[in-house]
Image (cartoon, helix red, strand yellow):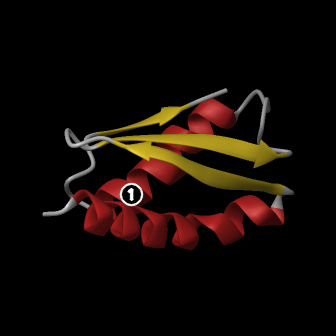
Amino acid sequence: MAMEELKVRVQTALDKVRPALQQDGGDVELVNVTEEGAVSVKLQGHCYGCPFSQMTVKNLVERVLRQEVPEVTQVINLQ
């Protein structure tokens, strides 16, 4: 699968979690996707620097990405 297609699928999956983050005044930005399936994201708004940001990334963002895009192996939260 081409990297561009993988990035589009990841971005589409992120669009599904975005409303939940936006409800709390936050958002998520896709930073990078590697060929190994590692996805780097950056939380924004109220989510950036929140004490629960790591839990949000693992329990929401990573869970949804791995469901929607099985090629995703991990999600890394860049601060």
Q: Position of residue 33 (x, y in %)?
A: 36, 46
Image position of 71 (left or right of 7): left
Question: How dense is the environment of label 1, judged by Cα within 10 Å: few (below 14), some, or many (20 and up)?
Answer: many
Relative height, residue 5 to residue 31 (above, below): below
From the viewer's perspective, is 56 left or right of 3? Answer: right
Q: Which residue type does callout 1 highlight?
A: Leu
The quarter of the image holding the N terminus is: bottom left
Image location of residue 78, percent across then percent down:
59, 30
Outermost residue on the left side: it is 1
Judge left or right: residue 48 versus residue 8. Answer: right
How many marks the image carries: the answer is 1
Instruction: Please report the residue visible at 78 percent of the width from the left and 64 percent of the height from the top.
Output: 22
- The answer to which image quadrant residue 35 occupies is top left
Q: Residue at x 31, y 64 (%)?
A: 4
On screen, 11 above or below 3? below
Disc 1 target residue: 65
Q: Position of residue 19 (x, y in %)?
A: 69, 71
Residue 20: x percent and y percent?
69, 65
| Residue 64 vs residue 41, the one in the foreground | 41
